[in-house]
Image (cartoon, rainbow, N blue to C red):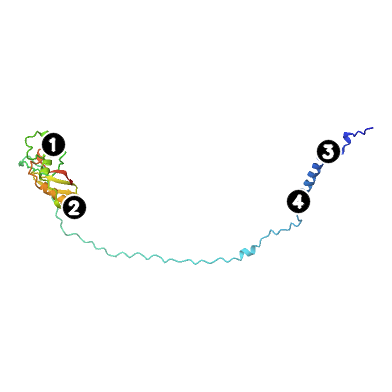
Amino acid sequence: MELKKNPKADLSRNSGLYFVIGLALVMLLTYVAFEWKTYDDDNNFDYTMNVEDTLDEEVPMTEQIKTPPPPPPPAAPEIIEVVEDEEEVEETVIESTETSQEEEIIEVEEIEVEEVEEDVDVPFAVIEDVPIFPGCENEPKNKLRECFNRMMQKHIGKNFRYPEIAQEMGVQGRVNIMFVIQKDGSIGNVRMRGPDKNLEKEAARIISKLPKMTPGKQRGRPVRVPFSIPITFKLQ
């Protein structure tokens, strides 16, 4: 004959739940035990303040500095002497500048103002009438500039000489020459810049042989005309 257990009589069925509830109660009691605080019944606090100690403090005495009174004003003189102005002042009479009909009016001759000619440099590229190189007199006006450059190159090629000392030293390069065609057609204010003094000296010699030219004109008046040209020295 088999024995049957009643499921309601099985005590081990809810053992896990009972264990969790017991553990929670133990932890709650432990927390309350740690947080429990007790206070003393002695509430006799001294709220009084010793006023006498604050009144014993000594206050330093300050000494007042007395400023002396300002000095009295100087006494006024008893008698005031009045000095009479005996000097006579001459009055200046301003004459009227207005003319009357009775006065004769003198006619003044016209004053001629002499015009002062200023030395103005007009560049070769913008001058109205370019300087005329000898041999270009019969060229039309629009061809004078081209003829001037052509005759200048011809003059340089005709008078060109390579300095011997520069040849021996193997010196070569380009010399830039600047000069001014004066108002009388002569050449002046010659300047040059090059790689060697011997080449510069030869370039100056070539420019010094330029002939006298017809001066350039601006608005019909002779003016100075600056001109620049390079001369190239090259060894073969």
Foreground: disc 3 or disc 2: 2
The kind of residue tagged 4 is Phe
Q: Nearer the viewer, residue 144 or 86?
A: 144
User: Tag 1: Cα neighbours inside 10 Å, few (<14), some, or many (≥20)?
Assistant: few
Give the vertical position of 95 relative to 148 (above or below). below
Foreground: disc 1 or disc 3: 1
The answer to which of marks 1 and 3 sits earlier in the sequence is 3
In the rendered image, residue 67, in percent from the top left (x then y), is placed at 43, 66
Whether residue 131 sits left or right of residue 73 in the image: it is left
Task: Identify the element where label 2 is drawn.
Answer: helix
Foreground: disc 4 or disc 3: 3
The residue wearing badge 2 is: 169
The residue wearing badge 4 is: 34
Q: Residue at x 14, y 51 (%)?
A: 164
Residue 14 marker: 3
Q: Residue at x 78, y 49 (%)?
A: 30
Q: Is residue 217 visible?
A: no
In the rendered image, residue 13, in percent from the top left (x then y), is placed at 84, 37
User: Tag 2: Cα neighbours inside 10 Å, few (<14), some, or many (≥20)?
Assistant: few
